[in-house]
């Protein structure tokens, strides 16, 4: 009984008059997915570029200030618990 008239539950195959997939709707869905993915990705890219430019400007300004004040940063390596730390030893 379970297989009785199962062929009526299956939708008919696509014909020339009625295609199985509407290509216009499929293209619109794909474009929408790309927009959903690329919008935050583009925003993140702009934010990273802005932050990198700001850090570069700050580094140049602090280096110029350090040259005027004659500040020397001596890089040192501290080994503690098997990890390497680069920079001055904390007080």
Image (cartoon, helix red, strand yellow):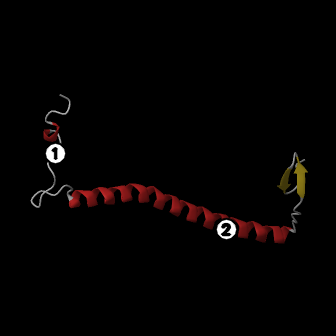
Left or right of 49, for residue 79: right
User: In the image, what residue occupies the spot 87% across and 62% down?
Assistant: 75
Residue identified by numbered label 2: 56
User: Are circles 1 and 2 on residues that touch, CB within 8 Å?
Assistant: no
Mark 1 neighbour density, 10 Å: few (under 14) some (14–19) many (20 or more): few
Q: What residue sits 21% from the left and 56% below the top?
A: 21
When asked about the image quadrant of residue 58, the answer is bottom right
Q: Which of marks 1 and 2 is nearer the N terminus?
A: 1
Residue situated in front as seen by the camera: 33 or 88: 33
Q: Distance between the residues labelled 1 and 2?
A: 62 Å
Residue 64 against residue 17 in the figure, above or below: below
Residue 5 against residue 49 in the figure, above or below: above
Residue at 32% across, 60% down: 31
Residue 81 x/y as whole percent: 87, 45
Give how far across and how far down residue 11 sits, in percent: 16, 45
Task: Tell me the element at label 2.
Answer: helix
Residue 89 seen in the current view: no
**Quick check: can you spot residue 79?**
yes
Local crowd size for mark 2, using a 10 Å CA cut-off: few (<14), some (14–19), many (≥20): few
Q: Tell me if residue 1 comes above or below residue 31 in the rendering.
A: above
Image point 36% across, 55% down: which residue? 33
Mark 1 lies on residue: 11
């Amino acid at each position: 009984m379970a297989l009785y008239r199962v062929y009526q539950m299956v939708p008919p195959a696509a014909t020339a008059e009625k295609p199985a997939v509407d290509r216009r709707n499929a293209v619109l869905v794909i474009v929408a997915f790309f927009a959903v993915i690329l919008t935050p990705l583009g925003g993140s890219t702009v934010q990273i570029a802005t932050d990198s430019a700001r850090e570069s400007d700050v580094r140049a300004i602090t280096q110029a200030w350090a040259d005027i004040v004659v500040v020397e940063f001596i890089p040192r390596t501290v080994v503690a618990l098997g990890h390497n730390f680069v920079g001055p030893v904390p007080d």
